[in-house]
Image (cartoon, helix red, strand yellow):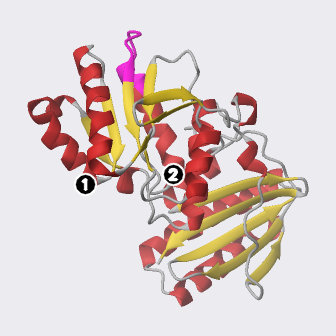
Amino acid sequence: MLYRGTANFLHHAVPFIRDGLDAGEPVLVLTAVSRIDALRAELRGDAGQVQFADMAQAGSNPARIIPLWQEFIDRGSKDGRPVRGIGEPIWPERSPAELAECQWHESLLNLAIDPATPIWLLCPYDASALEAGVVAEAHRSHPLVTEGDHRRESGAFRGLGGSAEPFSVPLPAAPLGCRSLAFGPADLATVRATVAAFAAQAGLKAERKDELIAAAHEVACNSVQHGGGGGELRLWRDHRSVICEFSDHGRVDDPMIGRRRPSARSAGGRGLWLANHMCDLVQIRTLPQGTVVRLHKRL
C-alpha cells in the first residue's frame, strides 16, 4: 500500500481493519507509535479489539518480524479462521543496513507464509517520505500494489521463484584497515577474546558486550562446523554500532535461516536464531565463494 501522509494512511488502513473486525477476524498492526495513536483515535471503541505493537521495538531487528507473524497466525487461525495484519517495517530514518534487511524481509514474506494461509497482510509505504528506489523495490517484492484507490498486480514482482534473490546480493565491503583474524577449531576462545576487547574499546556496555560475544561465538562455531573448518573474523565500528563479520567457505541454502524458530528436532539454524535475538541486526549472504554473516550491536 503506497500512501502519502497520515490522513491517506488512515483512509486505507481503517476500512481494512474494520472489515476484519466485522468478519470476526483477529487483527494485528505493527507500525510506528504515531500511526498507532492515529488509528486508535479513528477506531475509537473498536481499537480495543485490535492488537497493536510498535514496529520500532518489535521489528528493530527486521529478522524478528516474520516469527511475530507466524505466532499471530498460529494463535489466530487455529480453527481455519482468517486473520489480517498491517506491517510497516520501513521508514526514512532506517540506516542503509537496516533498510536492506527490511527489504529482504519484505521479499521473504512471500516464501515464509504459505499461499494457502488464510491471512490478509497489508504492507504500507509512505511514498511521500521514502526515496524512489525504496518504492520501486516495494513493487518488486509485492504481488499486489494499492496506490490511491486502485489495486493492481505489480508488473515488477519477482515472483515466488525470485523472492530469495537478495540473499545472494553482496554486502558493502568491510572498511580498509579493519581488524581481522583467521580462525579454526582451536581458536574459538581467541575469537571471543578478540570480540570482547574490541567491543570494550569501542565503549559497548557490559551486558550488550556479553550478548555480542555470545552471538559471535555461535557464528564462529557455525563456520567451524559448516564452513570448511574455520573462517575469517573482521571487526570495525561506525558512528552507531560495533560490527563483527564472519566469512567462510560454507553455503547456506535456506534463505529463512535465523528467522524461523528452530524446532526441538531441528538439526541446525539455532545459532543464527540466537544471534538475531542477541544483536540489533544480522545480515546473511551466500555468495559463490562462501557465506558472510555480519553482526551489528549498537553503541
In the picture of the structure, the residue carrying the numbered disc 2 is: 62
Q: Which residues are magenta?
A: 73-83
| Residue toward you, 104 or 10 | 10
Tell how many labels.
2
Circle 2 crowding by C-alpha within 10 Å: few under 14, some 14–19, many from 20: many
The part of the image, by quadrant, that contains residue 3 is top left
Kind of residue indicated by mark 2 = Pro
Q: Position of residue 204 (x, y in %)?
A: 48, 81
Assess whether mark 2 and mark 1 are in contact (beta carbons under 8 angstroms): no
The part of the image, by quadrant, that contains residue 217 is bottom right
Secondary structure of the residue carrying numbered label 2: helix
Observer able to see residue 273: no
Kind of residue indicated by mark 1 = Ser
Q: Position of residue 288 (x, y in %)?
A: 90, 53
Considering only order in the chain, which callout, 2 or 1, is on the residue closer to the N terminus?
1
Q: Residue at x 33, y 38 (%)?
A: 29
Q: Position of residue 48 (x, y in %)?
A: 15, 33
What's the distance in space between the residues labelled 1 and 2, CA to CA?
Answer: 19 Å
In the picture of the structure, the residue carrying the numbered disc 1 is: 34
Answer with left or right where residue 120 lies relative to residue 222. left
Q: Residue at x 60, y 81 (%)?
A: 237
